[in-house]
Amino acid sequence: MVVTIALLLGFQLLGITIVTLLGLPVPGAVMGMVLFLFALMIFDGLLQKTLPVVNVLLAHFALLFVPAGVGIMQHGERLAAEWLPICASILISSVLAMAVTILVTRGVMRLMHIKD
């Protein structure tokens, strides 16, 4: 368990380091997750070794939303004043994310010769 947590934190640190050194406009934690994904695809057995700890972390995933909830409560006045642009940006970005997901999925299915 400790080794898996150290591995996950190591990928996060590596991602932060890469983003900082290269000046990329991506959060370091996201870069670390991408690197971890590549490691899972490359090294056989890594998924089976990390899965028990990852499942425990995912079971407590709701705790990660506590800081966001506190931020919403703390900035209630600002949210009330700027609700229209916030709602519009959430709606537009959600529609764009779904459209891109559909296009990428169709493209991958076409490349893999999978019928709809």
Image: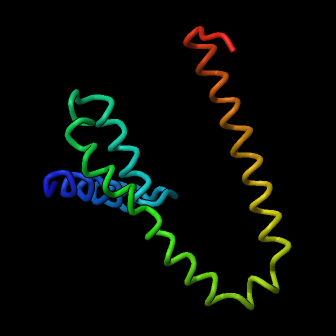
Considering every residue shown, the one lying at the far right of the view is 84
Residue 20 or residue 74, whichever sits in front: 74
Q: Quadrant of the C terminus?
A: top right
Query: What residue do we see at 14% from left, 53% from top?
Result: 3
Image location of residue 58, percent across then percent down: 39, 55
Q: In the drawing, does residue 78 fall left or right of residue 9?
A: right
Query: Compared with residue 40, is residue 90 higher up or lower down, i.e. above or below?
Result: below
Image location of residue 103, percent across then percent down: 70, 29
Image location of residue 93, percent across then percent down: 73, 54
Query: What residue do we see at 47% from left, 56% from top?
Result: 24
Image location of residue 91, percent across then percent down: 79, 57
Quarter of the view holding residue 85:
bottom right
Q: Quadrant of the N terminus?
A: bottom left
Number of numbered discs on residues? 0
Query: Compared with residue 26, is residue 85 higher up or lower down, i.e. above or below?
Result: below
Q: How is the image coloured?
A: rainbow
Query: What residue do we see at 49% from left, 76% from top?
Result: 66
Q: In the drawing, does residue 81 fall left or right of residue 12?
A: right
